[in-house]
Each structure stands twice: as structure tokens, then as C-alpha cells.
Amino acid sequence: MPKHGPRFNEFIQSPKVRVIDENGENLGVMLTEEAMEQAAAVGLDLVEVSPNADPPVAKYLDVGKFKYEAQKKANLQRKTQKTQEIKEIKMRPNIDDHDYDTKMKKVVSFIEDGDKVKVTLRFRGREMSHQELGMALLQRVAEQTNPIAKVEAYPRLEGRQMLMVLSPK
């Protein structure tokens, strides 16, 4: 038995299979041995392409080429998939307007790239007694990014930091 990949030739367990020839034409349902003999006559293998069908569908193919193309297709899918990262932007509650605008440009670019953004607001010293300033700042960030992002985790205080997570819509 092949450890992975499709069953072929003598490894096909079903007594009857629906056969498709090398040109893609349906030859109908026939005995597996008969189909293997016809495939060998053409110089190809009988490969089970749809084992869960009733009866299973088998095709005249070159097994090595079929496995190679399947592996190539899987590698291409793995290469093109995008993983979503969490980017972090750190701010202070009394941030200046220009600094805020610069940070917001980065937040917008991260979200447009499809990444999540964790906005961290760090309080130092007496700033802890004015947490409403931090909350107002995070609300401003949420309102400004509302057209392109949604708030995944609303602002919460963890020690001396206030956190909020934004994700693309």
C-alpha cells in the first residue's frame, strides 16, 4: 500500500471502478483488473482519483507525474498563503498631534496589509491617575480606523498599560 497519495494499480481495493481514459473521456464502470490491463496497454497506470465516490473513479495516468504535480500544487498553495500577524503600536497618553498622526499612518498601513494591530498605551508615574485621557485616546484611534478596522478587543487596563486590539474588516 502507498503510505500517502492516491491508490494505484493493484492497490485499488474496489472490485469495480468508473474509468476515465488519458484524454478525459468516460469509459464507464468496469472491473478493476480489466481497467488495469487497458491502462497497461496504453503504457499508463490506473490511479484512483476519487476514492469516496460510488463506484470509485479511476483514471489512466502516470503515477509519478501525478504525485509530482500534486506536490507542486501543495507547495504553491503553502507559499501563497498569508498568515495574519499581530503588530504592536506603543503610545503615551499625552502624545503630541504629529506623533499621533505618524503612529496612525503605521496603524492604517498594518491593517491594510491584513495584520492585526495591538495598540498599547503605557502610563508612567502620575499618569495613572488620569486613565480617562488614555481611554479617550484609544476611542479616538478606534473612531479614526472605523472604516477599515473593527475593534477585536476593547480597551482594558493591565497593570500600567491599556491595551486594545484592532483587526481588518
Image (spheres, grey):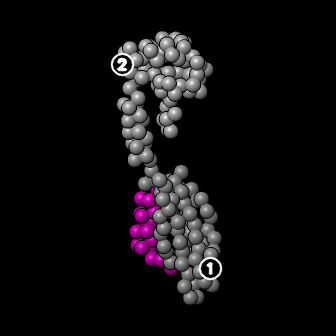
Specify whether residue 108 is in view.
Answer: no
Q: In this view, does 109 lie to the left or right of 150?
A: left
Residue in the image at 52% along x and 66% along y: 118
Foreground residue among 130 and 60: 60
Decide if residue 105 is in sight here. Answer: yes
Three-letter code for the amino acid on which mark 1 is drawn: Gly
Q: In this view, does 10 lie above or below 72?
A: above
Magenta stretch? 94-112
Q: Mark 2 points at which residue?
A: 43
Chain-order first, disc 1 or disc 2? 2
Q: Which mark is residue 9?
A: none
Q: Where is residue 5 in the image (x, y as percent from the top left)?
A: 48, 35
Residue 72, percent from left and from top: 38, 39
The residue lying at 56 percent from left, 56 percent from top is 150
Neighbourhood count class around disc 2 (C-alpha, 10 Å): few under 14, some 14–19, many 20 upward: few
Residue 19 percent coordinates (x, y): 49, 16
User: What residue type is disc 2 on?
Assistant: Gly
Residue that badge 1 annotates: 159
Q: Residue furthest bottom?
A: 125
Asked if the stretch drawn in magenta spans residue 107, the answer is: yes
Give yes or no for contact between labels 1 and 2 (Cβ–Cβ under 8 Å): no
Q: Which of marks 1 and 2 is in front?
A: 2
Give yes or no for residue 160 being in the magenta stretch: no
